[in-house]
Structures are given as structure tokens and as C-alpha cells.
Amino acid sequence: MQPNKTVLILGANSDVAKEAIKLYVKAGYKVIAASRSTDALNTFVQQQDFLKDVTVLYFDAIAFDTHQQFYDNLPCKPNVVLYAAGFLKNNEAAIHDWESCFRMMKVHYCGAVSILNIIVADTNNMQLEKIIGLSSLSGVRGRKSNFIYGSTKSAFTQYMAGLRQYLFSRNISVHVIVAGYIRSKMTAGLNLTESLMLEPSFIAKAIVPIPKRFIIVPGFKWKLIYFILKILPEKLVARLP
């Protein structure tokens, strides 16, 4: 149990974030769950009695000019921050639809940088211990089937890597969950390999408690895929779907 500690979850209506909320509450944390979908979050919280102390707040990852006020008005400053906001448009559609393409950039990278910069700039919050981000194996190597989505996740991972170094002297750890296919509302309807699908609860267990290393790849099969993608020659990557 971790009494009197608070976790701030940004993008808390995602399937993984909801599972993480359950685990954080069971571990004794107070949870501030922030999302645009406050009605859905409140319904989720009310359906489970043990989540009654979860605080639900409105947060829009791409409303950058509201982020400072959002942070300033938090009921308490967090010990742990989890950035789990996500948006997915298939690659071909994103190529032809700039607004969807740009939205992925804003949700996965610009929004994360905006709010996390504000959080880490608050040096008065001496209790900040960990910052965790939900990234993707799609960002490990550029592939023709998903390079737009993947590029936004790659940028996010690189930002988190630099942030980890930046915060080292303050003893604040930074971590990214580099996840494979997750069975969620965001991937519903996509033609994904069933044997590689991971449940949101499985991903959440890799978040709570977080290991000490920077990159966490949940699932043995995805660890192997991650390793192969890292070392595969570019001429072979070009043949991947």
C-alpha cells in the first residue's frame, strides 16, 4: 500500500487507463482521472464501489492553452503521472485527411509535451516521483502500413527518453510502455493478429507497479518482436506490411 500518494492519469478513459485506475486504487493511491469523456469516466467509477474516491476532471490533450490552468487547479499535486491519451486513424486515411493526421500528432506528442513540460517545470512539487507514458511498438521502426501513427509514438518515446535524462538529478524516474496490439475500443474493427492481442488489464499490470527500466515491453512475444525490429536491416523492414 502507498497511502497519501496521488496518481494523475491523463487520457483516463482509455481501456488501459481504466484498468490502471483499478490497480492504483487497490495499491492505496488516490487517483485523479482526467479526460474529455467525463461522463463515461464517472459512470465507470460509479459502477465500482471501491473507486468511489477517484476524482474525475476534464482534460483535453489538444487544448494546449488550458493546460496550465488545469495543472494549477488540481486538488493536489501528483506523485505519479500517467499519460495515456490516444487517437488512431488508419494510415491511408491519415495520408488523405490532414485533420486526422494532425490530431494524432497533437494527441500523442504535442499534448504530451505541453502538459508534461508544465508538470516538470513545477519544481515546488517535491513529491513528484514518476512519469509514465503509453507508447507503441509502431514507433520502433517506420513501416509502410502505419508510419504516420508510428511516427507520433516514436516522437513521444524520444521526448520521454530526453525527459528521463533531464529529471535524473531530481530523482524523478521516467518510463514508457512500448505496447503491441491491445484489445481496446481504439483498435476495434482493425484486422489484427488474434494471437498477438493483449488485454488492457495485462498492460496495466506492467504499469502498476512500474519496473525501474525506461522501456517496458509487455508480453514475451512482443519483447521478441521489439528485439527483431531493433536489429532488422532496413532492406528487410521495407518488406514488412
Image (spheres, rainbow, N blue to C red):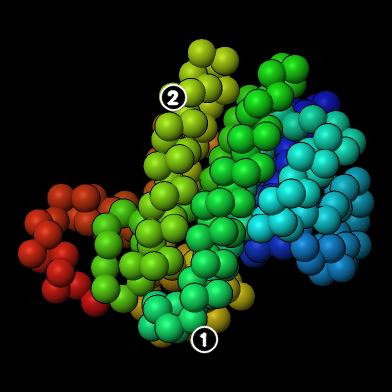
Callout 1, which amino acid?
Answer: Gly
Give the camera-side residue of 3 and 184: 184
Badge 1: how crowded within 10 Å, few (<14), some, or many (20+)? few
Q: Please state the total of marks drawn on the protein image.
A: 2
Callout 2, which amino acid?
Answer: Gln
Residue 62: x and y in percent read: 66, 58
The residue where tag 2 is placed is 165
The residue where tag 1 is placed is 189
Residue 41 at least partly seen: yes
Residue 216 at least partly seen: no
Residue 201: x and y in percent read: 60, 59
Q: Which residue is most to the top? A: 169
Q: Is residue 206 left or right of residue 121?
A: left
Q: Give the residue drawn at x 61%, y 35%.
A: 117
Q: As displayed, is residue 168 above or below residue 55?
A: above
1 or 2: mark nearer the eye: 2
